[in-house]
Amino acid sequence: MEAVRTLSAEYVDKPSLWRRIDMKWLVIGICVLGVSYLALMPLFFLLWQSFFTPETATQPATFTLGNYLSAYTSPETLRLLLNSVTFAAGTSVLAFITGTALAWMNERTNTPFKSLFFALSIIPLIIPGILFTVAWILLGSPKIGIINLLIQNWFNTDYVLFDVYSMWGMIWVEGLHYSPMAFLIMTAAFRSMDPSLEESAMMSGASIRQIAWRITLKLTWPAIFATFLILFIRAIESFEVPALLGLPVGIQVFTSSIYQAIHQYPSQVGLASSYAVTLLLITTVGIYFQSKLSSQGSKYSTVTGKGFRPRTMDLGKWRYLTAAIFIVYFALIVVLPFLVLVWSSLQKFYSVPSMEAVQNLSLDAYRFMLDYPTLASSTWNSLVLALGSATVIMLLTSVICWIVVKTKLPGRWLLDNLASLPMVFPGLVLGLAIMVFYLNVDIGIYGTMWILFIAYVTRFLPYGLRYNTTSMLQIHKELEESAAMSGASWGTTFWRIVLPLLKPGLMAGWIYIVIVSIRELSSSILLYSPGTEVISILIWELWENGQYVELSALGVMFIMMLFVLVMLAQLLGKKFGVKE
């Protein structure tokens, strides 16, 4: 009897299996598995599909090297590579020169109203790439472009001044669209650089040109190289401009070729995958060099423990010229594109500005779009995907960052690299990889909102990681140790101490991911189905149907909605102490 009582007591005192599981390891395990699944599965299936023939109803898929032979033994591939590199390099150079010159004028000179120009620099980032491209088609098309038609009417000529359907036109549109990114990055670089060397050179009699060329540019070399690499990677994975401007005149790059290979009949998924592998290699090399450069940035550091106060250069009467350059730039990148969309949206049929056209102004396009059958569902889908993916990404990456920054677990560097892996995927390639995976692994999400949700979470995972890492490094370990000494569990400590302290970084990352998610097109265009369209897909469909007036009305409403959303986000950010 005594033995039975002892066994019973042990059984009663023994905690259940569920209670014996440490919640910390359960949460960490789920997060690690989730990140590994999101990052690796698309990559493996993209490579796997590139070695197989398409599966049809009558013929199963078979192993082949034909996709690579078709893709890389054709002279067409050399032309694709040349076009892609020309487009990306031209875009990078234009965006970099424009953004750097404006950043230098903003930070190092006494240009009037420069604070206002800096505040306005966020507006170009709000305009989605597809709307920016459509606006420049309405401005610079040889047949319907307002710039060309006005000049032809004024000078009574047939001469086409600006042809947006050309390689130069593509570089112009994409370069302008990415120049605000270069402006913001280079502004940060100039702002954090100790200007005492420039001031010493000025005192020694050096000219402004000599100071800019021999001191400023050399000290900001890491930022220059990193900015150029980022612009090159973004340009080579770009989809909207090559598809809208290049395809109609036969100028193909890798992204537009992937899109065409999938949308032909029968669909050549294997050929598209082999093209995507090349694009993946190019972006991987670019991001490797960018990371390498970041690790060697200390060689160029000029900010020490000694405080400094930047002193701007006096440009004299030339400061009015630099102010004029800012105004022209703002007109090209915001005012003209937005006004042409507004003008187009108020027409019954698209026409150039004239007194006759003014008499025909109408709000019919807005009424048409407000009654459009899929407008409400597309808006709802975009909001759900943007808000949902941003929330999941920030929570998931907060645990990943805690593992990487706060623990000594072996292999945590691998977890950091896994979460950063989706950065090398161009949007279209990621969409293709996820499409291939869920076509072959049927778990019931292909054709639903869930596949878009997975694509958004995968694509923007690295952004959440970067925002959370910066904030996590600032939290000292002793706060968690104090909580543990007081008897708090890991879950309580993480929820009530770590997450509240991460709030500024969490909110900043959440706001950024919401904005970029709601404009997303390149992955969505391969994954959407009837009923799961997002707003960018609706714009794309209107363009393909030739409904330019209705598209313009939707574009104006979309930009206004994004502007309100960004303003609300900024107010929310200030409330939670998010710095710009």
Image (tube, helix red, strand yellow):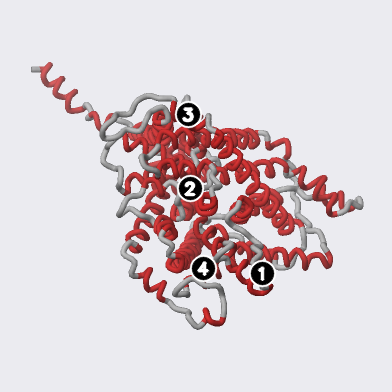
Q: Which residue is mark 2?
A: 501
Q: Which mark is residue 68?
A: 3
* x and y percentages locating residue 369 in the rendered image: 38, 68
* x and y percentages locating residue 579 in the rendered image: 56, 55
Dividing the picture into quadrants, the one containing residue 142 is bottom right
Viewer-closest of 26 and 327: 327
Nearer the camera: disc 1 or disc 2: 1
Residues under numbered marks 2 and 3 in contact, where contact means CB atoms less than 8 Å apart: no
Characterize the local packing of mark 4: few (<14), some (14-19) or many (20 or more) Cα atoms within 10 angstroms.
many
Q: Which mark is residue 48?
A: none
Nearer the camera: disc 4 or disc 2: 4
Circle 1: residue type: Thr
Work out which residue is located at the far right of the displayed protein and give it: 205
Q: Which residue is mark 4?
A: 341
Residues under numbered marks 1 and 3 in contact, where contact means CB atoms less than 8 Å apart: no
Circle 3: residue type: Tyr
Indicate which disc, 1 or 4, sits on the residue closer to the N terminus.
1
Viewer-closest of 195 and 246: 246
Per the image, label 2 sits on a secondary structure element best described as: helix
Q: How far apart are the two marked residues, 1 and 2, measured between alpha carbons?
A: 65 Å
Viewer-closest of 459 and 190: 459
Q: How far apart are the two marked residues, 1 and 4, measured between alpha carbons?
A: 26 Å
- Residue at left offset 55%, top offset 69%: 340
